[in-house]
Image: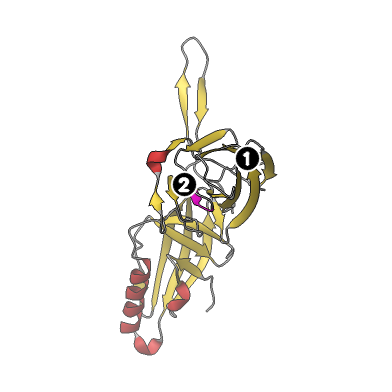
Amino acid sequence: MSGYEVTWAGVSSTTIPQLVCGKITRKMLGSHRGTFVDVPGRFGSWYFTEERGRRQITIECFIEAANSSFPAGRRDAVTAVADWLDTNRESTLILGDDPLVFYNAVLVDIPDVDEWREVGIFDLTFSTEPYSYGLSPTVEVFNLATGVGDTFDFDLLAPTYPVIEVKNTSGSSVAGFTFTLGGRSIEYGDTMVDDEVVTINSIGVAVLAGASDDTNLTGAYEVGDLAMTQVTGQFPILRPDINSFGIVSTAASTFEVTIRYRKRFRK
């Protein structure tokens, strides 16, 4: 029997031949978070909103072992599913009905399996961030001169945390820089030699000197020196609509700025 492919923590459900993943139920939006505050002398109350919370995805699954292998085949398949699901941290979830996006998810309930002869039936329930993410990162490259700004529409649905690589292309050393994006400025205070790259990771909240960060945008670090002691200000955020950005450094300096990000969706 066919069903949807489900990829959890990088491993596909199709690696377990007896497993079929069927109906998928998604919350349309993340949970609504806010606070009602009573105001003396006024009817009702004021409502203060916050960012949306997590949402839930439930997948109906069943195991169908061969009649000839009952009951050992069913139990072996249940064990294989348990091994597949067994992780204690947030991982990526990709669903076969929309395979071009992924969710950062946590398996929130250990499922009970209803077992009868060669069949086992259970539900998987995941808690995810309120948005899904494009499977492939988007990369935009800009050549900036100190004090000269630029604008760009990154075609976003929601605020998104980028990874930004700043490469010194001035032909000589520069005395650090201040990069501003959408009203947020971050200052790097150390000297950059020619061709050196400083990576500003707004996902992992870190700055690396001398190396590129993880282009998969997981927030993990690759080879490079953690340079947080050289940094002041706020980590940049990409916002829907037009974003203004620019860089200020030593006179006549130039930079190649690479902005990597994953688009977020309400899928």
Q: Which amino acid type corresponds to the residue marked 1 in the rendered image? A: Ala
Is the stretch drawn in magenta largely helix, strand or loop?
Answer: strand
Q: Which amino acid type corresponds to the residue marked 2 in the rendered image? A: Arg
Judging depth in this view, the residue of 9 and 27 nearest the camera is 9
Task: State the separation of the CA atoms marked 1 and 2.
Answer: 47 Å
In this rendering, the answer to whether 51 lies above or below 265 is: above
x, y percentage for residue 171?
A: 58, 50
x, y percentage for residue 211?
A: 46, 56
Which range of residues does the magenta coloring cover? 195-199
* 16 left or right of 48 in image: left
| Numbered mark located on residue 252 in the image | 1
| Mark nearer the viewer, 1 or 2 | 1
Residue 131 counted in the magenta span = no
Q: Which residue corresponds to the image point at 49% horizontal and 68% vertical from the top-left?
A: 6
Judging depth in this view, the residue of 123 and 150 nearest the camera is 150
Q: Which residue corresponds to the image point at 52% horizontal and 42% vertical from the top-left?
A: 174
Judging depth in this view, the residue of 234 and 231 nearest the camera is 231
Quadrant housing the C terminus:
bottom right
Q: Which residue is mark 2?
A: 54
In this rendering, the answer to whether 140 lies above or below 48 is: below
User: Visible in this render: residue 243?
Assistant: yes
